[in-house]
Image: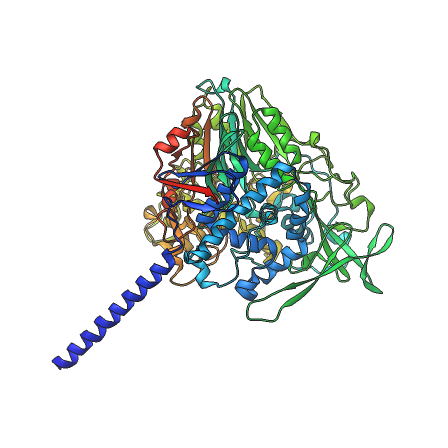
Amino acid sequence: MFTLFRWLVYILSGLLALTALVALAIYFFLSRSLPDYNEDFTLDGLTAPVEILRNTHNVPHVFGETDRDVFFGLGFVHAQDRLWQMQILRRTAQGRLSEMFGRRTLRTDELMRRLDIYGLARASFDVQDTATQDALRAYADGVNAWLRLTSDRARGRGAPEFFMFRTETPLWQPADSLAILKLLSVQLNSQISTEVLRARASSLLDNDRLRDLMPDAPGAGLAEVPEYSSLFPGLPVATQVAVFDDPLSPIRPYTLAGASNSFAAAPARAAGDGALLANDPHLELTAPALMYLARIELISGGVIGATIPGIPAILSGRSNALGWGITSAYVDDTDVFIEQLNPDDPAQYRTPDGWAEFETRGSIIRVKDEDPLTLTLRWSENGPVLSGALYDLGTVTPPGHVASIGWTALTAEDTTMTAAIRLMQAQTMEAAIDAGELFVAPAQNLMLATRDRVAMQTIGHLPRRNADHQTQGRMPAPGWHAENRWLGTLPYSSNPRFLDPESGILGNTNNKILDRPFPLHVSHDWGDTQRITRFLHLMRARNVHTRDSFIEAQLDTVSPAARLLLPLVAADLWFSGEAAPAGTRAHLRQRALSLLADWNGEMNEHLPEPLIYSAWMRALQTRLIRDELGPLEDAFTHVNPDFIERVFRNTNGAGEWCNVVQSSVQETCTDMALLSLDEALLRLTERYGTSVESWRWGDAHTATHRHTVLGNAPGLRAFVNIRQSTSGGDHTLMRARTSGRDPEPFANVHAAVYRAVYDFADPESSVFILSTGQSGHPLSRHYDDLGELWRRGEYIPMTLDPELARGGAVGQTHLYPN
């Protein structure tokens, strides 16, 4: 027996030793791709030496004698830290993901091919100005210099993921950067999904109830539009909802489109003698974050802020003369057209002048471990034709018809990259606004500040529509009617502009910024009606603002929606009835209502009230709309405070939603509130136990910064995903958008990936932070080091002083010309 035991010990020890050796070998090979930030290189493509200084947080400061060499250095550091991310972004834009991932990404590749994102990007290189073309070439040379080093010197193929998905990594091209910029338009677009959803809902609801469910921002008049079924009689009502949950897909539900905050204070409203500007773009939480911090020293001066790996520009940042931030403008820059096919020749479609031939071209998608897929790409005069599987277009397309897309982003005359380069070099407010004229897509609100001025300018092309458009661009429209077709684009001078306001304060939370009648309307659908109220309260609470008060606003977690809805929904429930015995449903309800009665609406991760409120409102909205919409209710994943307010105020008869259509009993809104509260509490007790006071919002509102490829892989996801308990919510200034889908409906999936505050009274006191870390390498200490600071609401300093950068450098790389 002793001998057997001894042999078992030997075998177990051997297996443990072998496991350790394998783990060490894997670590050795994977760590080969970790860059040494104190290594020097001699490279082709440089005209003079480049110095790259990295601070404690791995933010690179790139110095060179010419702009070309500086852009080379930026491409080099992007590739050092984010090569895998750049590869995925490039392949997504090219429609070539299926070569690596197989059938999983076929739909994404099909979308990119049909939109011709990469073809348009290649064509747009010629319309950039000479300086931008030089920057694109130099940036590509810098990326390729690192690619060659990883190949020639066995540097672990550049990233650990390349070992798991063996594929070629072609040299970087200028068109790759232009394509990634166009890809942003796809990722941020909400107009297509909104048009389709409104059309589907209109088939089930009359106009009054549709206005309740998908209301315009308050303060706007609404012109009547026809029911979608009247445009296409006989179209079957489709209520099923397709769910796209692949992180590699650029298609997201309209509720998870891009969002942001940006606000500025003129010197008259600032404690110092210079303007203030704050910006926090909101995007999907990924590991690494989409953005990357960098400082580059151009001939025009130093620039520091947020870049996107693959793009040679700082998209939100500051120089010594100018600060700028961006927010999604929610411009109505996209229309869905329904094209009628010729029943005798499906290669033709109907136009105002008769039948016309589609422009067609073949495209082959290579699929890993399967036969290639051949697509026939078609374009009408209105735009590219998409299949019914994309954006649920098939649910609103009658038989014998196809859907095409009109979109300002789908042009080869796209000078957005030139606009971004010129914005970095601008030294005055006028120069910055002039640069915006070249910006095409994605449409943004550009917040600007110099030492003594502030401004906000909407940049991006706005379509020119006919005043007689049948749906006003709210829903898909017949493409053969002349009045539905675009008449070009509006002049830049018609874009909203706000210069040096009398109040001294400018702000945008994706809210409605002006009220103009169609067709000069800018948008029907805005991204916020709640955060803006909290912003106005905070700005009016002080006569003068400081950097710290702007930081306080960025991190504010009070929900104006909760403060609005709870008094309405619970009006007849507060402290009603006798005290109920412990352990009963009524007692649980009373405990929850007692907590909510004393709550100030702060969505703090350590409190139970935000969880009770969120679960209650979610259950309430579902109960209100399920009987009218059926399965289509699944498309309305997030609570719409405007809808619930209209219902409980009975605005224009909206109280009808409280009555269950299939029931013979006349239910009241109080009945709905009570039933939904009990339902929410039941679900919460099943998940978190019966001790209501011990529930934590942060347990449900966990932020998962998910690796786009390995984030769902068993075992690996524990190493590549970053999970954090977080405060905030859907309608707080510190926006932390929930998923809206079971089994984790309150998970934080969309938030500020970059926060910054620029203080022109003392520019060196400006600060910023990223939601993860600078490195995309899971073994790097810089993979998540900034993420914990981000979660706690902390920032790191921002310097454009070369001596401070050198004095604080912990890594110093020199690139020498060969």
Residue 499: percent from left, percent from top: 60, 23
Residue 494 lies left or right of residue 527; in this view the side is right
Query: Which quadrant of the structure image shows residue 663?
Result: bottom right
Whether residue 456 can be seen here: yes
Q: 656 or 682: nearer the eye?
A: 682
Residue 697: percent from left, percent from top: 39, 46
Whether residue 578 can be seen here: no
Identify the residue at horizontal 37%, vertical 60% (top origin): 29
Residue 518: percent from left, percent from top: 73, 36
Up-down relation of residue 219 to residue 283 (above or below): above
Quadrant location of the N terminus in the rendered image = bottom left
Q: 138 or 604: nearer the eye?
A: 138
Residue 444: percent from left, percent from top: 60, 37
Q: How are the residues colored?
A: rainbow
Residue 809 lies left or right of residue 675; in this view the side is left
Up-down relation of residue 29 to residue 75 (above or below): below
**Furthest residue in direction front, as rendered:** 818
